[in-house]
Amino acid sequence: MLIRKLTSLLLLIGLLAIAGCSEEEPEYVERPVEDLYNEAVDAMDARDYEVAVRAFDEVDRQHPYSVWATKAQLMSAYAYYLDDEYDDAVIALERYIDLHPGDPDVAYAYYLRAISYYEQIVDIGRDQRITKLALNSLQEVIRRFPDTPYSRDSELKIDLALDHLAGKEVAIGRFYQSRDEHLAAINRFRVVIEQFQTTTHVPEALQRIVESYMALGITEEAQTAAAVLGHNFPGSEWYADTYALVEGKPRASNEEGWLTSLWSWAF
């Protein structure tokens, strides 16, 4: 008798535990698409972006083949962006682009994806993978939608992305210099000069190439780099240091090197 009571008690405790752990699924209530969309917009206006995302997603879930669903997909991505949830924004935007490549708002989707990467650009001391993604995405906006305001703004933002990538190469080159690995340093500075000629890091890259060539005893290449620096950036502080380093007015090499080939108009 005692065993039977204990068994019943344990069974009751087990059932109560199961009931306590399980939560009832919220009842599915289909609502008019206009009500759902307006609720999402109201949440956006209130800057309650998490609620807005859920509401826009509910529009897509309950009315997947409506015009409102297409708009809701894009607005959900925008809500993620405003909430600084950039990875979720990119995922949502890529889904939108895949599903609606011919939609009138697809240019904005490409642009918002690029900006979602752009907002994540970090200082040059860290990995620049996001910067490269931002650059590629901004260039894609320009290529696909050249006559739009999105293209013009992308062109402005590309300058910062390029400057970050150039700054990273210079930082790595300086590191190699500190270890007296001058050939490796020169290769990094060459990347700046050959691929990022419009950035603010070119004068420093040229000056540091002079330093590394001088350290290696390759005087003529050092003088060529100094000549390029002096011709293009005569008022730069980097040129003042270079002038002192090569002890006199730099002269270009008579031999055809990578610098004279790249900057032949300077001689």
Image (tube, grey):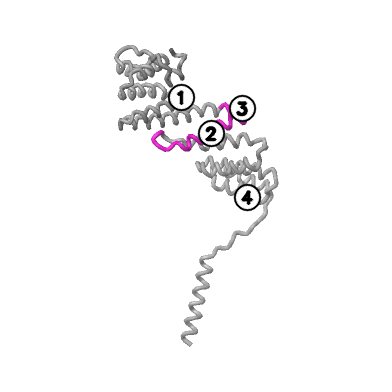
Task: Name which of mark 3 and mark 2 comes first in the sequence.
Answer: 2
Quarter that holds the C terminus? top left
Mark 1 vs mark 3: in front: 1
Element under disc 3: loop
Marks 1 and 3 in Cβ contact (< 8 Å): no
Which amino acid type corresponds to the residue marked 3 in the rendered image? Pro
Q: CA distance from mark 4 to mark 2?
A: 32 Å
Give the numbered dot on residue 58. Answer: 4
Q: Read off the residue under disc 2.
A: 136
Name, please, the residue furthest toward the front. 255
Of marks 4 and 2, which one's residue comes earlier in the chain? 4
Q: Which portion, as a residue range, is magenta?
A: 124-152
Up-down relation of residue 181 to residue 43 (above or below): above
Instruction: Give the distance between the C-alpha atoms of the residues marked 1 and 4, in whole angstroms.
Output: 51 Å
In the rendered image, the vertical position of residue 200 relative to residue 11, given as above or below: above
Where residue 157 appears, as percent x and y from the top left, is 51, 29
Secondary structure at numbered mark 1: helix
Disc 4, disc 3: CB below 8 Å?
A: no
Question: Between tags 4 and 2, which lies in front?
Answer: 2
Real-space Cα distance between discs 3 and 2?
Answer: 15 Å
- Identify the secondary structure beneath mark 4: helix
